[in-house]
Every structure is written in C-alpha cells, then in structure tokens.
Image (spheres, rainbow, N blue to C red):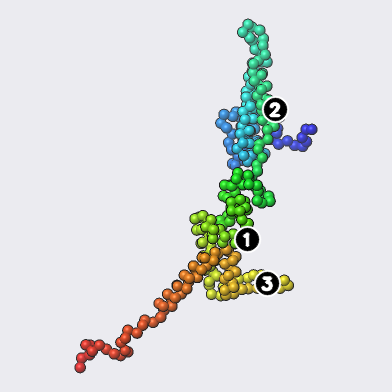
Amino acid sequence: MAKRGRKSRAELAFQSIEPAALRPSLALVQSPSAPQPPPHFGEAEQRIWRDIFSDYEFSTKTAIAVLTTALEAHQRARECREAILREGMTVVGRDGQAKVHPLLAVERDARQAFLTARKKKPPKDDRPRLWEARPISYERWLKHKDRIMASTRAGSRPEEWWAYEKQMPRPRDFAAERVTLFEMAELTATELAELISEWRECYEKASEPGFSYCIGHAKPGDTHATWLSGPAARRAQYRRVGIPPALIKKWDAERKRRAKTIRRLAEPPADSGVAAGETDGADSIN
C-alpha cells in the first residue's frame, strides 16, 4: 500500500531520475552538522544529499556509505538518461543498421542498483540509551566501552564497569562510589585533581566555626527542619560529598599541627635567665 500524507523533500527527490535540465534549480541551506556531499557528485545528487540530511539523521558511517553508493548509482543512471535524450533511443551500427542505444542497459542496471540501495537498512544503532535497563549485555559493553566511559562523570563508573570489569555490586550512591574508587586506586590523575579540590573545599567549609548542616525532617511528622552542629555536622558534610576517610584523617592531622604551631608562636618568649632590673656587672660604673 502506498504511503499516505505529505512526502518529505528526500522522498520527492527519489520519485524519478530526471535530467538536470528538466528540474528547477533549488538553493538549499545545509545544516552545519550535516556532512558535505562527495565532490564527484553532480548538482542533482548534491541536492538530494542535502535534502536527505535535512529530513533524517544518520548516526553511523555505514549508513552514510550506503547513501553514497545509492547516489552514485543515481548519478550514473541520470547521466545515461541525459545522453540518451541527446542521441536518441537508437544509434547507427557499424553496418549502418539501427540498433538500441548501449547506454539503455547501463541506465537500467544503474537504476536497479539505486533502487536496491534504497531498500537496504543501515545497521541498527545499538548504543545504550538513557532509558535502557542497565547493565547492558557484555557484547554491547565491549563494543561501546570507550564511548560509555568517556561520557561518565569524574568519580563514577557505569553499571557495566562494576558488573563486568570488577564483578562486584555498584556502591549504593554517588558519594560511596567516590570513596570506593579512591580506596581501590581506580581514579585517574585528572579525576583525583578535580575531586581533591572539591573535597578540600568542602572539608574547609565544614571546619569553619559555627558550621551547621541541615538534614531536613529528622523523623516522620516533623514540621521543622533539623540542623546538625559540631562533629555531627562535619561528618554529614563529609558523607554528602564522599570524602575518603584517609583524606579526612590526613587533613585533621594537618589542622592539629597547624593549630599547635600557631599557639606556640603566640606564646611569650621563654625567660632568658636575667632577673628583672638586673644588669651586667661590667656595665655598672660606681
């Protein structure tokens, strides 16, 4: 059954293979994201290429290769048709007899190749989608591993990495995942630089005098928010951003050493052993 409704520009362009002289010239603006048509394409094929990319999005190189092959066949059939229109359906043979134009067979084969290429379906794009159940299959993970890892934020790993690479359950939340990756020494140098800067900033904020942390309604039925203070507030802050315990211990020790140094420098200098008002005997002259 024929498709009903309005046809797209790409479908209209595929309806017939006509000589360029019989078609109106169209100046189409190509999307900046669409690839340029191959330079060996004629004007008609370049126009079809732009029409197709204005209506559809090709996500694989194979799909673009199929389209290129189809339009090459389209161009071959069009050029044969133009030559036949100029020279006629028959030509004069070697002995002066009329014979069928040899380009008719070439046009027929090119037209058939074009129609066959149109029917080919590009390979299914099986890249993981956001709404898919995870983890995806191991085969798809191996195929798209680099792409998935590149799109993962710092301090995190995709579900498939935990399932297939480490054979262990993914931590319960993002903060716990950060701590686990740090303790497993799986964070890259770039990730460490980014995370340690964030962790240190949150640590210093929690160490400020009077720091408090809101945990919302502490129990069902509460009508007011609950605020933590002191060590409890600091621990809640550390859990929220996923600061590893080893770093908290290290930074706590640094703060204690720094505070001790500040107190020592603030103390008055020790007694020099010379009593108040006492002078050196060499300096007294009687």
Q: Answer yes or no: do the residues labelled 3 and 2 have beta carbons within 8 Å? A: no
- Residue 280 screen position, x and y as percent: 25, 88
Q: Earlier in the sequence, mark 3 or mark 2?
A: 2
Residue 176 falls in image quadrant: bottom right
- SS class of the residue under badge 3? loop
* Disc 1/disc 3 C-alpha distance (Å): 20 Å
Mark 1 vs mark 2, foreground winner is 1
Type of the residue with mark 1? Asp
Residue 207 visible in image = yes
Residue pictured at 58% horizontal, 70% vertical = 235
- Residue 11 screen position, x and y as percent: 70, 33
Asked if 78 appears above or below 265 in the picture, the reply is above
Q: Earlier in the sequence, mark 1 or mark 3?
A: 1
Nearer to me, 139 or 219: 139
The residue beneath circle 3 is 218
- Residue 131 screen position, x and y as percent: 68, 51
Nearer to me, 160 or 17: 160
* Disc 3/disc 2 C-alpha distance (Å): 72 Å
The residue beneath circle 2 is 16
The furthest residue to the left: 286
The residue beneath circle 1 is 173
Residue 20 falls in image quadrant: top right
Residue pictured at 62% horizontal, 59% vertical = 171
Type of the residue with mark 3? Ala
10 Å crowding of disc 1: few (<14), some (14-19), many (20+): few
Nearer to me, 92 or 275: 275
Asked if 26 appears above or below 228 in the picture, the reply is above
